[in-house]
Amino acid sequence: TKRVQDWMLEDGSFLAAYRDKGRLSPICDQVPLYLVKGDDMGQRGAHLRAVRLLQETCLEQALRIWEESVGDGAATATLESIQAFLKASGLVSLGRAIQRHFDQMQIFGGPVPFEDFHFAYKCVPTDVFVESLVPGEDEVEGRNLAKQALVRPANDGNSEASRRELADLCMKYDQL
């Protein structure tokens, strides 16, 4: 915020305290210090975390589909075998989206390595991706939060019980 920026830059007490570290002062002088002016750092961090979770989920799902359609450890597969598995699994729209990707890349027939399949899977539209989520054996029940969990509690979450509940919820979702 503007007030913090003024305090850090104009007052001088922040830099004086930062550098006043006794025998560690020479090290502090060598460490770059930046002032982040963005007010939306929390949103940026949450966005980055969401993108990383999406990428992880995408890779996991692509691996599950690959392993179930062509077998564990197979280096390549044919597009036809992947399409047959997707059709048999009821994932017809995913099969069409992957086929469109391979058509655009002008890949027709022949062996398809996992890397190409994974890239095609990452390119499918979001609604098709969500429809194609295949639960794994170790999938945690109740991955989606209920709407009530997203509503601010009456005490703003400041009670000890509320903090414990939040910590438990965070631990649960960190394990996903």
Image (cartoon, grey):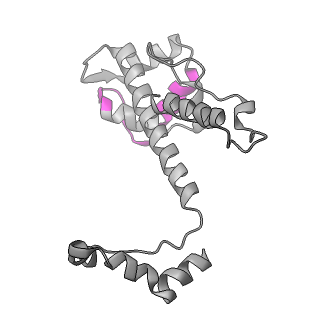
Residue 73: quarter of image:
top left
Q: Please tell me whether residue 107 belongs to the stretch shown in magenta.
A: yes
With respect to residue 70, does 32 lie above or below? below
Q: Residue at x 59, y 62 (%)?
A: 40
Most extreme residue toward the front is: 22
On-image quarter of the N terminus? bottom right
In the image: residue 120, left or right of residue 146? left
With respect to residue 161, does 20 lie above or below? below
Viewer-nearest residue: 168 or 45: 168
Q: Residue at x 39, y 77 (%)?
A: 17
Residue 31 makes an appearance in the image: yes
Picture coordinates of residue 20, whole percent (x, y): 32, 78
- Stretch of the chain drawn in magenta: 92-114
Most extreme residue toward the right is: 154
Picture coordinates of residue 52, whole percent (x, y): 45, 43
Residue 121: quarter of image:
top left
Picture coordinates of residue 113, whole percent (x, y): 28, 30
Q: Residue at x 45, y 83 (%)?
A: 13
Residue 27 makes an appearance in the image: no
Q: Residue at x 44, y 39 (%)?
A: 55
Give the overall secondary structure of the magenta segment.
helix
With respect to residue 69, does 33 lie above or below? below
In the image: residue 127, left or right of residue 95? right
